[in-house]
Image: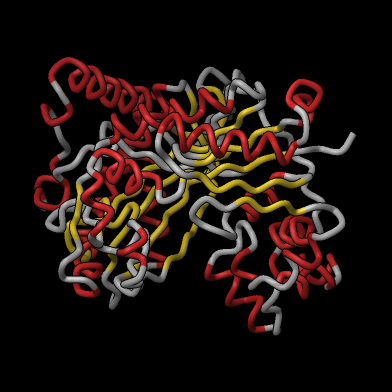
Amino acid sequence: MEKWILHIDINHCYAQIEEMKNPALKEIPMAVGGRESNRHGIILAKNLLAKKYRIKTGEPVRDALKKCPKLRIIHPDFTDYQYYTTKVKDIYHEYTDQVESYGLDEAWLDITGSLKLFGDPIDIARTIQTRIKNEIGLTVSVGISFNKIFAKMGSDMFKPYGLVHISKENYREIVWPLDIGDLFYVGQATKTKLNQVYITKIGQLARCSKDYIKSLLGKMGEVLWLFANGFDMSAVMLATSKSVVKSVGNGVTAIKDLTTLDELRSVLLVLCDSVASRLRDHQLKGFVVTLSLRDKQLHSFTRQKKREQATNLCQEIMATIDDLLARHRDENAAYRSVGVRVSDLIFDNRQCQLSLFEDPNAKVDMYKLETAIDSLRARYGYYSISRGLTRANSHLTDFNPKGDHTIAPKGYF
């Protein structure tokens, strides 16, 4: 049986909800973003008038205001965003129990098993689109296809209120002429590598040898080749399914560019502390520690290291981060955003090989100390206790990455 998968995207979600709450915002350039003076000073969403000024999601509020001095910045209200997006997804669930969220504003729906109840899949998509507009007041774009990747690409093509059907018969005409950067999971670095070998269109990638693309980009190259050729067979998860935690991470855009090693380490230590605490909450520990850095030109890179022993301790994660910094930090760079992630996870109760070069009693003491910090914060609040290193740059480290309300899509894999 051919699959019928929808990908539905609430157009400029946060900004559209703010316009729905206050219709006057439709008449002016407006964006949802943080305060310019703090680390959350980035654009989260923009309305159509702001888009005309080339305002970009993820750019600093300061830069957006340079492009459009009259830009109205609305600070995010995630409680409202969760409320309205939940109402939207309630409509999805009336048509299928296979609804897989991708952040607050996007979701895949597998309606293959719903056709006998609701009829033609194109009609189902239009009905859902119309109901969301009439019952909630939001516009959505819909992609329809035989796999998740093409369905998502279809929902991105025409906004607002678009509906695109990409089939096995027409995907070469619709998808292959698109820029290679439009393929799901092709970021700027991957696009640059492909452009260097004169692959600028999705069709060019699709027609290449799979082995050649794999030799160029590694395992991810093979995945992208499969995507371009329509071979994504991943299933839409049931709404009741719980995804397995594959990694735990935190990132932050600093209040100012980080120019010294001390500043960088202070912020990274706060992130390591948060990641370690979250790992302990899930009763997990991990082998692979990843450092992410983005400079003030918005160039990003990640580096990772696999530890001999899995960990969920801040001090051990930070020690690995220090090693990555020593080998990969550019001393002349100013870093705007940083991130820490731990992956290759195992359950905390799994026995690990002891190291001949570490004192096991010291690790036990370290664990007791960090769990004591968790307990104090749970009882008296996050700011009741902090690490000495972070106080040296308190203007940079005065944030709570574990407690802050961060909403972002989970990874596809």
Residue 86 image position (x, y, % from top left): 44, 26
In the image, what residue occupies the spot 49% across and 59% down?
303
Residue 199 sits in quarter: bottom right
Quarter that holds the N terminus:
top right
Is residue 309 visible in this depiction of the protein?
Answer: no
Is residue 403 visible in this depiction of the protein?
Answer: yes
Quarter that holds the C terminus:
top right
In the rendered image, the vertical position of residue 77 relative to residue 368, given as above or below: below
Residue 135 image position (x, y, % from top left): 44, 29
**Residue toward you, 266 or 166:** 166
- How many labels were placed on the picture? 0
Left or right: 162, with 65 as reference point: right
Q: How is the image coloured?
A: secondary structure
**Residue toward you, 261 or 76:** 76
Residue 16 image position (x, y, % from top left): 35, 46
Left or right: 271, with 282 as reference point: left
**Residue toward you, 284 or 221:** 221
In the rendered image, the vertical position of residue 197 relative to residue 229, given as above or below: below
Left or right: 231, with 59 as reference point: right
**Residue toward you, 141 or 338:** 141
Residue 376 sits in quarter: top left
In the image, what residue occupies the spot 57% across and 56% down?
156
Residue 87 image position (x, y, % from top left): 44, 26
In the rendered image, the vertical position of residue 153 relative to residue 77, given as above or below: below
In the image, what residue occupies the spot 26% across and 63% down?
60
